[in-house]
Structures are given as C-alpha cells and as structure tokens.
Amino acid sequence: MLSISCLSRVVGGRAVVSDLSLAMAAGEVLAILGRSGSGKTSLLRLVAGFDAPTAGEVRLHGALASVPGRVLVPPQRRQLAVAFQDATLFPHLDAVDNAGFAIRGVDRPTRRARARAALADMGLADMDGRDVATLSGGEAQRVALARALAAPSRLLLLDEPFGNVDRLTRADLVVRLKAQLARGQAAIIVTHDPADAVELDARVVLMRDGCLEVDAPHAEIAAGTRGDWARAFVQGGR
C-alpha cells in the first residue's frame, strides 16, 4: 500500500526528515512516535502530498506519488483522509456538512445522512444546524475524526487525534477509533503518547531528529530488544 524509500526533506537548511524508508501493507496500523520536533508531522505531510521531498520517493497503492522536488499525485487523488491536531473546521458550514465535506458523487441529502452516521460513530448526535463555533474542543475533534472517516479512503492519516481532549474523551475516542480500524482501515497515527500505540494495536515507528530509529511491535521495544532509549520512550514517553 505505502512504500517510502530514502525520503528526506530539508527546510531552512535543516533535515526535518532524513533518509527514511518504511513500508506498510493494506489494513495495517502504524503509530509514529517521537518527541516534539522529531519529524513526525513532517513525515505525515510528505505521505499526504502536502510537501515534496528533497530526496527519495513515496509510492502509494503501487504508483509513484512523490519524487525529489515534485508531488506527482496531489493529495485529493491519493485516496486518503487526513485529520490534523487542530481540528480545523469550516466556520460557514454546520457540524454535519463539516463531517460530510469529503464525501463526493452523491446528492446533499445522501451526503448529510452519511455524515450523520459518521458523527454517530464518534459519539455525536443531533448535530444538524450546529454552529461549529459552539463546539467544545472534544466535540470539534470528534467532528474532525468523523470527517476523516466519512468518505471512503484507502489510508487514514491522523496527527495527534487525542492531543486536545480530556482523559475521559480520549478514552471514548480510542474505543470508537479502534472499532473503525478493526474493519480493516489502514492508518498512520502520529502521536507523542506510547499508550496510543498499545491501545490501537499499532506497529511502532519511533523517530528522533528526523530519522527512523526503530520500527517494531510495541511489546518488542518495551522488552528492551531495540535499545534502552527506545524502551524508555515507549514506557514513559520521554
């Protein structure tokens, strides 16, 4: 499904992603872990096609998608859905139309019906006419996740999906997202919290200073077979 080869991106003379290679299969869930500034979101943007690499290539679904200095397949043609940490919503649309924004090829009633179903999957009901400016942070995050899940996609990209919510909301969202992933949805989840990888049964990709340090199951890292620093990070997020 996804193949990244020798990928680098240099911004202002600094390599935010450096010579990184990895691959993932259809239906697989990857958790990209690392400290702030380690390159997690930069990698996600390269996969999404928002940025072009300085070196290396990205292949998606068997096709060459990005090469040095060029995005060959734009984000809207990559068959993926994206939700970033800030849960950016469109202020001129109500919560239902926000959730259904990426649904294409159907009439508005059908689109809104599918959006309501996605919102219900995220624990939100009665969102018709709801001004997004009145949503709490947790509600806004649920709408953003619903929008990412509402339209069919082959790959889901989530950047800190639980970063701006309280503990109880996070626990509920983890359960709901895990149910979606159990249907075979492939996903890459950027997070600073090792617990997310455990609870979502994800393969761990651990980054440091733009480089891929470890790519392994969480249990293997926690057992210490991939080094003391990696073990300390997944045990305490340090």
Image (tube, rainbow, N blue to C red):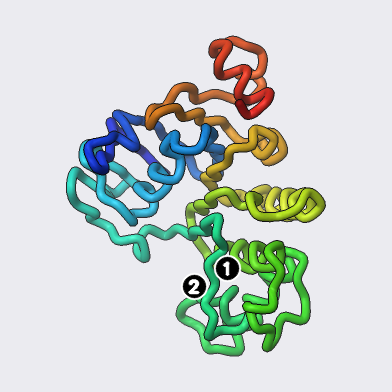
Q: State the separation of the CA atoms marked 2 and 1.
A: 7 Å
Q: Quadrant of residue 91?
A: bottom right
How many residues crowd mark 2 within 10 Å: few (<14), some (14–19), many (20+)? some
Q: Identify the secondary structure beneath mark 1.
A: helix
How many C-alpha atoms fall within 10 Å of the one at disc 1: few (<14), some, or many (≥20)? many
Residue 208: image x %, image y %?
Answer: 44, 27
Looking at the picture, how far across and down is residue 96, in whole percent? 63, 80
- Residue receiving disc 1: 147
- For the residues labelled 2 and 1, say whether their Cβ atoms are less than 8 Å apart: yes
Image quadrant holding the C terminus, namely top right
Tell me where residue 2 appears, x and y as whole percent.
40, 42
Horizontal relation, residue 135 to residue 155: left or right: right
Q: Is residue 29 above or below residue 113?
A: above
The residue at 36%/38% (across/down) is 3
Tell me which residue sits at (49%, 25%) in the image.
215
Residue drawn at the location 67% of the way across and 36% of the way down = 201
Instruction: Indicate which disc, 2 or 1, sits on the residue closer to the N terminus.
Output: 2
Q: Which residue is mark 2?
A: 102
In the picture shown, does residue 19 fall above or below 222?
below
At a point 50% along the width and 30% down the height, the residue shown is 205
- In this orientation, which residue lies closer to the viewer: 10 or 97? 10
